[in-house]
Amino acid sequence: MTNQLKDKQVRTPPFFIIGCVRSGTTLLRNVLRNHPNLVSPEESHFFRWSEPFGTPQSTRLLSSTTNAILRKHREMDGISENEFNDIFNKSVSRADLQKRYMQKYLINNKLEGKRWFDKTPQNVYCASMIATDFPGSKLVHIVRNPVDVVSSLRIGKVVKIDNLIGACNYWNEAAAIIHVLKRAYRDRVYEVKYEDFTSNFLPELEKMLAYLNEDFDAEWFSEFATTPKEHDHSELFTPEELNKIEKLCGRWGRHYGYFDKNIK
């Protein structure tokens, strides 16, 4: 690789994997981590909540004393709470915090990749701010059949939401926000279906990396064998509940081709 190309990659803006939880974002991040130029932490959640940065509410949400999940994520990233608190106290915005965090993450883990990315699906709620704060950055959206998403939320291995309205709105709200983002940032949003990515893995990955202006070598990803994971909906829901999910997720479910467009 030429020095010119290396310099270009160092200057390349980051990208952000966003969308709905339980849609394959973790799988996608873990695959992309095998690319020699790409590095990513666990999950940041810096752009998840609407409270302005620096307010007591935002500080509480990101605090190690009140948010055990984020404390665990930082532990997995190799960043101590003292280090995080120092970064946090020096930051003046979400973007500043993200940049400082990634710099510390790269240093602490002695990573060789030159381009970082973030995978926090719930950052979709402030994705327009991400696009503004990181000029030239790209947003990657992986979307999955809403019935499978709601099934996964009912099973609750990572996030448990048994209420159908709440579970469906995880999916609906992400889809609605992405719809607006695609119109506002036409060339900066890349979308892939979970089912396509898992069933046609290498070709879909090659297309995605081309969009991100990154090299592709199938050998980098040889350890992955992906197949679409579907839940047995009949064991998780009554027929009435399945009808309710299709009704609640109908608009965007039809938009993405998961539901019959003739059924309203």
Image (cartoon, rainbow, N blue to C red):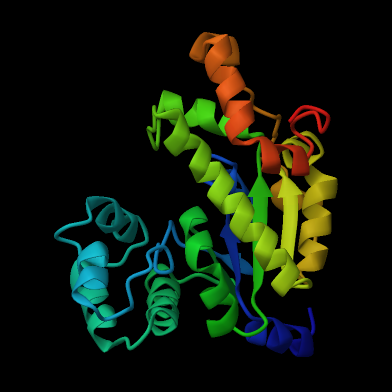
Where residue 260 sits in the image (x, y, percent)? Answer: 80, 28
Q: Where is the C terminus found, in terms of image quarters? A: top right
Where residue 203 sits in the image (x, y, percent)? Answer: 85, 47
Q: Which of the two residues, 240 or 144, is positioned nearer the viewer here?
A: 240
Where residue 182 sits in the image (x, y, percent)? Answer: 72, 65
Q: Is residue 5 left or right of residue 127?
A: right
User: Is residue 206 among what the camera can see?
Assistant: yes
Residue drawn at x 81%, y 49% as measured from the top left: 204
Q: Quadrant of residue 211?
A: bottom right
Q: Is residue 5 above or below residue 110?
A: below
Q: Where is the N terminus found, in terms of image quarters? A: bottom right
User: Is residue 36 among what the camera can see?
Assistant: no
Residue drawn at x 28%, y 53% as measured from the top left: 72
Residue drawn at x 64%, y 28% as measured from the top left: 246
Q: Which of the two residues, 208 or 248, is positioned nearer the viewer here?
A: 248
Q: Which of the two residues, 99 or 45, is positioned nearer the viewer here?
A: 45
Q: Is residue 242 left or right of residue 54?
A: right
Q: Residue furthest left?
A: 65
Residue drawn at x 79%, y 84% as measured from the top left: 2
Q: Is residue 100 above or below residue 207?
A: below
Where residue 207 sits in the image (x, y, percent)? Answer: 83, 57
